[in-house]
Amino acid sequence: MGKNLKYVIRFLAIVLFQVLLLKRIDLSYQNFNYIHIFIYPLFLLLLPFQWSKFLYLIIAFVLGISVDLFYNSLGVHAFASVFIAFLRPYILRLIEPREGYNKDSTPTLFKMGFAWLFIYTSILIFIHHLIYFSMEVFSPQYPFEIILRTIFSFIVSLTTIMLVHFIFRPKS
């Protein structure tokens, strides 16, 4: 299968899984509506190291706006996606292994190992969720709500993303 076709299929699968299944899961209890499962940033996390920053930002925008269309969220997912796409090179530099990255490689469990992948995923998913919920609430009057939504959604989303890594084990 061609490399680009693989990414198109992965994009469609992750977006459809997000908007058709995960959007419908309601983990709220009475007035406690702080858990939302977002795995669509996984697509951005699995993109190759060597792709250009500009292409990465464009893909992040398309991914986010695709999710926004189904969530009726007016660009909030797009903003959070583009934000982590912008930060990704800096995070990669921050957690770069001693031997460096293979420029033709992708950040997968198979190639990078569990510890590195867990740290990489945790940092970017936490930032994504913090930005998303800050923009969704968009009020400094509710910092406690932003923090609760970020933490609870981060835990559930990270767990789900790591399970996807273990189940599907993408090699590239």
Image (tube, rainbow, N blue to C red):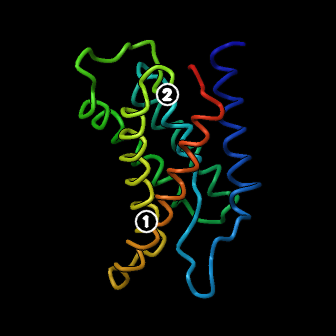
Quarter of the image where the C terminus is located: top right
Q: Which mark is residue 109?
A: 2
Please name the residue shown 72% across and 13% down the image.
Answer: 1
Quarter of the image holding residue 12? top right
Secondary structure of the residue carrying numbered label 2: helix
Vertical order, 42 against 68 (above or below): above
The residue under label 1 is 150
Please name the residue shown 44% across and 12% down the image.
Answer: 104
Q: Position of residue 143 (x, y in %)?
A: 34, 78
Crowding around mark 2 (Cα neighbors within 10 Å: few <14, some 14 to 19, many 20+) is many
Q: Amino acid at mark 1?
A: Thr
Q: Which mark is residue 92?
A: none
Quarter of the image holding residue 169? top right
Vertical order, 165 against 63 (above or below): above
Vertical order, 13 against 75 (above or below): above
Please name the residue shown 53% across and 45% down the image.
Answer: 41
Crowding around mark 1 (Cα neighbors within 10 Å: few <14, some 14 to 19, many 20+) is many
Please name the residue shown 68% across and 29% down the image.
Answer: 8
